[in-house]
């Protein structure tokens, strides 16, 4: 079974080709600090070839949702040191996912400050609201970032990468997917700037490429990767031509020296936009990637194995399956039944639905 074979990712030897996808669980405190329960959660899942942490705010200004963790002050770094140590004690590897939510945010959880974005364009999707500490709220119109603020945000990513290594993470992943800040810069639906960061595909890709260069310079190429979701329309993201946009972005990324690209396929819950290609995302975009390729979204043992057999993807990311099955590689090896995820406890709460999923005897 290819899923259970070891794999060399840069200087790291992964015990298998199964990676745990980043999943927001909203168990940090109001100051963005994770606790002992989070250490147990990740340590339980250390049999994954590689763990990606939940998305971590790179700065106070990156904050979008309540009870999500940070990695921008000493207390947060110290808290993550306990988590990474717990994973390493179990023989696991863990990367930090670096996150800026951009317009996917609300002032309620930002001390009254409006969200920031490439342009002052609100998310306007019928029936979609933002989860806040005071319940679901309509999205606000964000404030457009100035050129100086863009430069500062890129610096914040680089500093968060340094903080991640100080916290004991084995590497970092730039979250450039799922409608958050990097993808907002890429998409015409969120970016109507007329300066060097807007207009042409080259300009709209500039923020992501400059951020990747800054992160690579900060911690070294061997510890860096990026996550993209070319056809996923979450949070009102729409491209006039997603294939042309990502062909350019991936072509420029291929020129940089870093470790991997993760492609998250569109969630089945979101309909494909009418003008988008019907092609399989891994077939279409994965062939443009000249790095280690991680494929994600909705894989099972069978479909993950089939994806690896095609020879395009090198690793497979599993999300909810790892959430509910801390011993997922063993279950795949034995062909054992899987625990069913409890959707009601995915976001927020206590140990229930977090660290109490049973292991195989």
Image: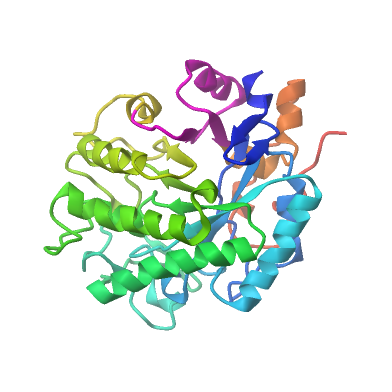
Residue located 57% across and 40% down the image: 10
Q: Quadrant of the N terminus?
A: top right
Quarter-of-image position of residue 6: top right
Q: Can residue 355 be seen?
A: no
* Residue toward you, 159 or 353: 159
Residue located 48% across and 40% down the image: 260
Q: Is residue 194 magenta?
A: no
Residue 275 in the figure: left or right of residue 72: left
- Residue placed furthest toward the right: 361
**Residue extent of the magenta highlight:** 288-317
Residue 188 image position (x, y, % from top left) = 19, 52
Residue located 41% across and 39% down the image: 269
Q: Quadrant of the C terminus?
A: top right
Residue 319 drawn above or below residue 162: above
Quarter-of-image position of residue 291: top left
Residue located 23% across and 57% down the image: 190
Residue 108 in the figure: left or right of residue 144: right
Q: Is residue 312 magenta?
A: yes
Q: Can residue 192 be seen?
A: yes
* Residue toward you, 141 or 295: 295
Quarter-of-image position of residue 137: bottom left
How many marks do you count on the picture?
0
* Residue toward you, 192 or 81: 81
* Residue toward you, 226 or 113: 226
Residue 207 image position (x, y, % from top left) = 29, 58
Image color mode: rainbow
Residue 196 in the figure: left or right of residue 216: left
């Amino acid at each position: 079974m290819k899923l259970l074979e070891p794999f060399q990712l840069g200087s790291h030897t992964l015990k298998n080709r199964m990676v745990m996808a980043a999943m927001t669980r909203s168990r940090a405190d109001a100051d963005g600090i994770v606790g002992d329960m989070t250490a147990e959660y990740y340590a339980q899942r250390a049999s994954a070839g590689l763990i990606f942490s939940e998305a971590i705010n790179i700065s106070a200004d990156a904050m979008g949702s309540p009870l999500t963790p940070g990695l921008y002050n000493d207390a947060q770094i110290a808290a993550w040191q306990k988590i990474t140590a717990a994973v390493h004690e179990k023989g696991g590897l863990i990367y930090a996912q670096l996150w800026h939510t951009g317009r996917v945010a609300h002032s309620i959880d930002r001390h009254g400050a409006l969200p920031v974005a490439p342009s002052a364009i609100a998310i306007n999707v019928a029936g979609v609201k933002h989860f806040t500490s005071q319940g679901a709220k309509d999205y606000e119109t964000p404030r457009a970032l100035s050129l100086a603020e863009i430069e500062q945000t890129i610096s914040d990513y680089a500093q968060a990468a340094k903080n991640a290594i100080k916290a004991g993470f084995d590497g970092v992943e730039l979250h450039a997917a799922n409608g958050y800040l990097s993808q907002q810069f890429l998409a015409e639906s969120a970016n109507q700037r007329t300066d060097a960061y807007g207009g042409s595909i080259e300009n709209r890709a500039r923020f992501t490429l400059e951020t990747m260069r800054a992160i690579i310079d900060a911690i070294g190429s061997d510890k860096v990767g990026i996550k993209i979701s070319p056809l996923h329309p979450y949070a009102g993201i729409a491209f006039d031509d997603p294939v042309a946009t990502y062909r350019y972005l991936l072509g420029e990324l291929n020129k940089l020296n870093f470790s991997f690209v993760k492609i998250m396929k569109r969630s089945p819950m979101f309909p494909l936009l009418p003008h988008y290609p019907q092609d399989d995302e891994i077939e279409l975009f994965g062939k443009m990637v000249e790095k280690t390729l991680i494929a994600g979204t909705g894989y099972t043992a069978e479909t993950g194995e089939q994806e690896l057999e095609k020879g395009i993807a090198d690793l497979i990311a599993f999300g909810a399956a790892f959430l509910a099955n801390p011993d997922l590689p063993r279950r795949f090896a034995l062909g054992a039944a899987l625990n069913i995820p409890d959707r009601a406890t995915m976001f927020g709460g206590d140990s229930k639905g977090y660290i109490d999923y049973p292991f195989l005897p």
